[in-house]
Image (spheres, coloured by chain):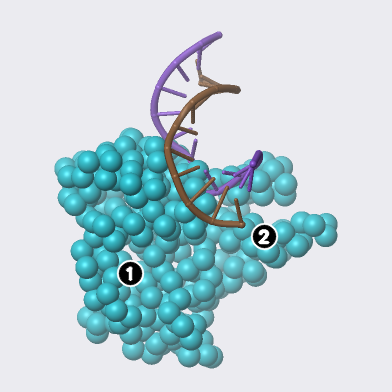
Chain colours: A cyan, B purple, C brown
DNA sequence: TGCCAGGCTTCAC
DNA sequence: GTGAAGCATGGC
């Protein structure tokens, strides 16, 4: 399936820190995995992209990459006097907020606390290889993300052995909460933002920041604005400690993602050194 | 080699 | 209610 699509940059999305299982497979193409599904997306130039997946799955991936949303609209709302956000958004042009599966996102961001992105990726890969179902993709064999049922039967040692450190008990506890039906997409979709955050933070090892990431990347609550060490650093340096969320009511999470991607970039390092 | 990482829970006070 | 300590491990 070939489509024309603006505001869609695979490399930036894969490196934006919102997902940990999307990777390059050569020629600018990327493979993405979700559940037992996979897709290889190849940029063809002139904003055209080839989606290599089962025909029945195209609608799923179109939704997953949030391709129906008008990101130009978000750009048009950026305060032109905000030089920093303007630079960050231009640098992150093409990033979209993915609509990821709830359990995978929850476990991934529980793991993310006090780890850098390569370390997070490694732990998630180990979990998938050891406890996920083997699947076939256009690029050979891979593993699905483990189910709650698969993880909740494991010992704490088996989980810790995926380089998880003290997070082992958090992962096991979350798996049990999902397997028992205490928390699910169906339940969270019935709640408003505050209620969903409250339900998520009731999970052992999930605080405000991780819950906000889950809301943003799995529930597609793009009003969520996770504040981690990178964002906090930016807020202190450029926004007197607080971002003007009110100006971006309903979609501040998109701006957050531009800021995060920019903060971690060489471009920001360079700009900071030459201020 | 030492510092830091998409923080959270626990425990003083 | 608020703030500091402790946490396991890997990347740079």
Q: Is residue C7 above or below residue A64?
A: above
In this rendering, position of residue A81 left or right of residue A265? right
Residue located 33% across and 43% down the image = A160
Above or below, A50 against A161 in this view is below
Q: Residues within 10 Å of mark 2 (few under 14, many from 20)?
A: some
Position in image of residue A2 (x %, y %):
38, 90
Report the residue at 70% width, 65% height from top. Answer: A267
Relative to A253, A170 lies left or right: left
Whether residues under marks 2 and 1 lie with C-beta atoms below 8 angstroms apart, the answer is no
Mark 2 or 1: the one toward you: 1
- Report the residue marked by disc 2: A85
Task: Indicate the position of residue A184 as horizontal and vertical percent values.
Answer: 24, 49
Left or right of A42 in this view: A57: left
Image coordinates for residue C3, horizontal then vertical, percent: 60, 23
Q: Which quadrant would the C terminus of chain A be assigned to in this image? A: bottom right
Mark toward the start of the polypeptide (2 vs 1): 1
Dividing the picture into quarters, in which one does residue A25 lie?
A: bottom left
Q: Kindly identify which chain the residue marked by label 1 belongs to.
A: A
Q: Secondary structure at mark 1?
A: strand
Numbered mark located on residue A33 in the image: 1
Nearer to me, A243 or A237: A237
Q: Where is residue A102 shown, x and y percent of the image? A: 31, 54
């Amino acid at each position: 399936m070939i489509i024309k699509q603006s505001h869609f940059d695979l490399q930036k999305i894969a490196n934006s820190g919102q997902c940990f299982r999307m990777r390059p497979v050569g020629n600018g193409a990327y493979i993405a995995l979700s559940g037992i599904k996979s897709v290889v997306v190849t940029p063809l130039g002139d904003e055209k992209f080839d989606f290599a997946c089962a025909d029945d799955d195209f609608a799923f991936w179109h939704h997953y990459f949030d391709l129906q949303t008008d990101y130009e609209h978000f750009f048009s709302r950026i305060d032109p006097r905000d030089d920093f956000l303007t630079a960050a958004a231009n640098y992150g042009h093409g990033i979209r907020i993915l609509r990821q599966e709830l359990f995978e996102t929850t476990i991934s961001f529980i793991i993310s606390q006090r780890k850098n992105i390569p370390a997070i990726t490694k732990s998630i890969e180990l979990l998938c290889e050891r406890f996920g179902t083997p699947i076939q993709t256009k690029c050979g064999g891979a593993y699905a993300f483990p189910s709650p049922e698969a993880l909740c039967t494991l010992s704490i040692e088996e989980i810790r052995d995926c380089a998880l450190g003290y997070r082992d008990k958090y992962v096991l506890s979350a798996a049990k909460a999902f397997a028992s039906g205490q928390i699910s997409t169906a339940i969270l979709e019935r709640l408003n933002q505050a209620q969903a955050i409250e339900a998520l933070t009731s999970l052992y090892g999930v605080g405000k920041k991780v819950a906000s990431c889950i809301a943003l990347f799995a529930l597609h609550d793009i009003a969520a604005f996770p504040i981690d060490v990178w964002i906090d650093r930016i807020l202190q340096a450029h926004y007197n400690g607080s971002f003007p969320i009110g100006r971006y009511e309903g979609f501040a999470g998109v701006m957050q993602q531009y800021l995060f991607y920019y903060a971690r970039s060489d471009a920001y390092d360079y700009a900071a050194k030459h201020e």
